[in-house]
Each structure stands twice: as C-alpha cells, then as structure tokens.
Amino acid sequence: MDWGTDLWDQYDIIDKHTQSGLELVEKYVKFVKERTEIEQNYAKQLRSLTKKYNPKRGCKEEQECRFSNHQSFLDILNEMNDYAGQRELIAENMMMNICIELTKYLQELKMERKTHLSEAKKAQQSLESTYKQLDSSKKRFEREWREADKAAQYAEKTDQDINATKADVEKAKQQANMRTHIAEECKNDYAAQLQKYNKEQSQFYFSDMPLIFNKLQDMDERRVRKLAQGYVLFSDTERHVMPIIGKCLEGVTKAGTNVNERNDSIALIEQYKSGFERPGDLDFEDYSQGINRASSDSSLGTLGTPKGPLELLGKNRSKPFWLFSKKSKPTVTEDFGHLPPEQRRKRLQQKLDDIGKELQKEVDQSEALEKMKDVYEKNPQMGDPASLSPQINQTAQNMERLRLELSKYESWLTEAGRRGDSMLRRDTLPEDALSYRSHSNNNEPYSPDGTHSEEGAPDPSQAIYAEFDDDFEEEEELVAPIGQCTAMYNFPGASEGTITMQEGEVLSVVEEDKGDGWTRVRRANGNEGYIPTSYVSISLSK
C-alpha cells in the first residue's frame, strides 16, 4: 500500500499530514531545549549551593575539617558538584545530539517537502492550462458550428427565394461553405485538444501525482524514523551518565558511613586539652591574726594564669589579627601600573599591537597618497597634486604620533619585563626570607635577607605586592595544587586574568570551577590564570 495508489485523490490530507509531522518535530525540539534549560539551571543552582556552603580558605570551618562529620559534609558538597557536572553533560549532549541534529534535519525536510509540493502544483497548473485550451477550442467549435448551420440555412432559404438574384444565391452558398470549412477546422482542433488533455490527465493521475505522493510518503517515513531515534536518545543520553551519577550518590553514602562520632570526640579532646590541673582550694587568710596573705597552692598560680575557674574557662583571649589590612583599589594609570605584572605586560603588548595596526594603516594610506600624487603629477588632467597635501600632512602627523606612542609603550613594556623578572625571583625565595612581613607588625622592619632594615625605609617590592591585596588578600603564599588538568583544545588567553594553553598541555589546578565556567590553574614556572573549564579534562586529588 502506498499514498500514490490509495490516496491519489487526497492531496489536502497528505499536505496537512506532512505539515503536522514537521510541526511535531519542531515541538519535540522545543521540548528538549526546555529540558536542557532545566538541567542547566538545576546544575547552576547546585553549583551555587555547593559554593555557598563550601568553607573559604583559612576560615574556621576549614579548620574543623579534621572532624569526620565536617569532612563528610565537604565530601558531599564535592560529590554534588560532580553531580551538577553530569547534569550539565546531559544538557550538552541533548542539545548536540537531539536539538541541533533534528533542527538541521527539519530544515532539510522542509526544503524537500516544498520541492515536492511545488512539483505537484506545477503538474496541476499544467493540466489546468491544457483543460482551458480544450474548453476554449470546444466553445469555438460550438460557436463556429452554429454559425455554419445558420449560413447553410440562409443559403437554402436564398436559393428558394424567387426574388433573390443568382449572385445573391452564389454569395450565400459561398458563405455557407466557408463557415462549414471553419467549423470543420474547429472540430479537428477540438478533437486534438481533447486527445491532448486526456493524455495529460492520464499522465497526471496515473504517473506524476502518484510519484510525488510516494516521495512525500518516503519523506514522512524518514521523518518518523529520525524522530523515533530522537526519542531513544532522550533516554540514552541520561542512561549513559547514570553510572557516574550512581558513583556520586555512592560517594554521598560513603561520606555518611565515614562519620565516626567517637573519633570526633577524641579529636576535639586532643586538639583543645590544656593539660592543666584543676584549681585547688584557696587557703583561709586570717587577717585578725595578722597573718600575711597566703598564696594559692593551685598549680595554676605558679604558672601565672588566672586562678578563678570562670577565668580559666572563659573566652579565648588571643584574637586573630590580619597581617595586612585591606587597601583601597589603585587608580587606573596609562601605563597599566595598577595591574599585576603579568596582566600589565599583556595589556601593554595588546596596546602595542593595536598601535602597530593603526600605524600600518597610516603607512599604507601614506603610500597610497604618494602614489596618487605621483599619478596626478604625471597626468594633471586626472587631478591636482596640491589637493592631496593636507591629507599627506595629516597622515604624517598621525604616523609621528603613533610612533611616539609606540616608543612610549615599548619602554613601559621593557620596564614591566624587568619588574616581572624581579617579582619572579622574589617569588622563588624561601619563606623565611619573607619573614620581615610578620615583624613589620611589631615595628621591627626586616629586609628580605633576614637582617634589620632602617626604620621607615619602604621596600619597593612590598609596594608591588600591595596591588594584589584586593584580589588575593587571603593568599599570601602559593596555594598547593588540588589536582591536575590536561588541555583538550588551544586557548589564547587574551582576556585579563586568563592564561594561554596549548592542546595536550598539563597544568596544575589551583582552584575549582565555582559555577562560573572558569578554573584557576598554574604552570610549572609559577604563572597562574583562569581557563575555560570545558576546555580541559580535570583530575582532582581526593
């Protein structure tokens, strides 16, 4: 059974059915897109949630991670972050394998359907045109035959009229013969048009339209198969990540079973046990007998600590203080001196590239103007060479200005290079060489080599480090890597704070993606920056 044979007279039904099928594909694509948006929003909310409850570096909660219940909670947050990544993967695969593929296939089907319907319309128009010709020849034949019949009757009547002359009779007979001849020609033309129409009609109903309908049937069946594959992919996409999601859930379960309340209590005791003896009884001091005040036999008294138990159990007297206070953001300067060295060098290099491009444009324009001037001088009829002088002078001024700017930024870039080298050498010093920082809070300035420096003499390198306080106030030392990543694609690192990366390059992960799509990494030479998380394959050390 096929459409061309069994639905030969159901053109409108086939038209509506194929259109309805295409609309179903569009509807399914929209459905999957909305599903991917839900998955992406869900993953984004999960990442924001884990980021919200993840302790900041150096905070009190991070210090409490030695307890199993705190560490298990962090493990759950990490597992949920991985779980969010799998939801993102589901959304990405659905978008790539279903939405994009079906959308592309849908456009092809629309074009194919349009072509088939256009062929059907052309065949229909051709048949209608032939029918109009047939109808026209038929009406002409009918009209001419009536006229011939009238002419014959008139000739017969004239022939029988005794008052008619012989010339009138001959004229009437000639007119009748001419009309009869014309009618015969119209009859033959009508017969030819009828034969032509019947042939085209047979071709239309038994060959052309069945072929077009069968093509539409084949197109619709291919659409159905493709849509069915999309239905299957909808479940397979999620089924493929279920093992990893299962591992994430197993990790959550394992985090719960790893909690040991007894070990947490022992850890708290070991961390905060003072080792002091409880305060002893105070001696009675009898002032009526003139006895001097007796000192307490408490072991705490000999240690110079408070004797009262309330004082002993009171709040911790040692309060944390920050080594460096937060400073206001630096003023933006033309030489980008307010930026960190690496970012400053990048910005200066970018500025040099922009100036170089502008300078090259001016040079090209200058050469073009000079050539045009030379042409005008050789062919005065083409133009006045003097009219180009203002443009040539302006171009020369622009070139001179750009060369001065280029020289200025090159000097700043050279300075930034030396400054960056000194910073790099300073970063490689041992920790004790930087101990003057802590002494500076006690009004004991130290130089980087560990000796005392003169009072009030500022350290230029310290001024450089002050620029980092806004962004890295909690990271005075290099943070230990938490894993490694391998680059799957090249990344130019043209934006501020990013770092270049080549495919296959292995980098150390310093900070995980916090839900914004960027991961902070470090090279072996100490250079740090951000890269797109989707460009690398990350392996974190548990």
Image: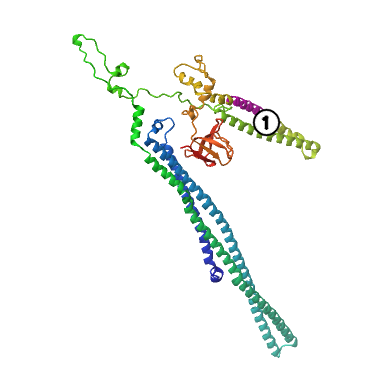
Front residue of 198 and 20: 20
**SS class, disc 1:** helix
Residue 503 sits inside the magenta stretch: no
Percent x, y for residue 394? 69, 31
Residue pushed farthest left? Answer: 288
Q: Quadrant of the N terminus?
A: bottom right
Residue 404 sits inside the magenta stretch: yes
Residue 409 located left or right of residue 39 = right
Q: Is residue 243 above or below residue 482?
A: below
Please state the extent of the stretch shown in magenta in the rendering: 397-419
Quadrant for residue 109, please give it. Answer: bottom right
Magenta-drawn stretch, dominant element (helix, strand or loop): helix
Of the residues shown, which amino acid type is indicated by label 1?
Asn
Report the residue marked by disc 1.
398
Quadrant for residue 488, please give it. Answer: top right
Percent x, y for residue 43? 45, 44
Front residue of 365 and 150: 365
Q: How is the image coloured?
A: rainbow
Front residue of 486 and 53: 486
Quadrant for residue 414, please give it. Answer: top right
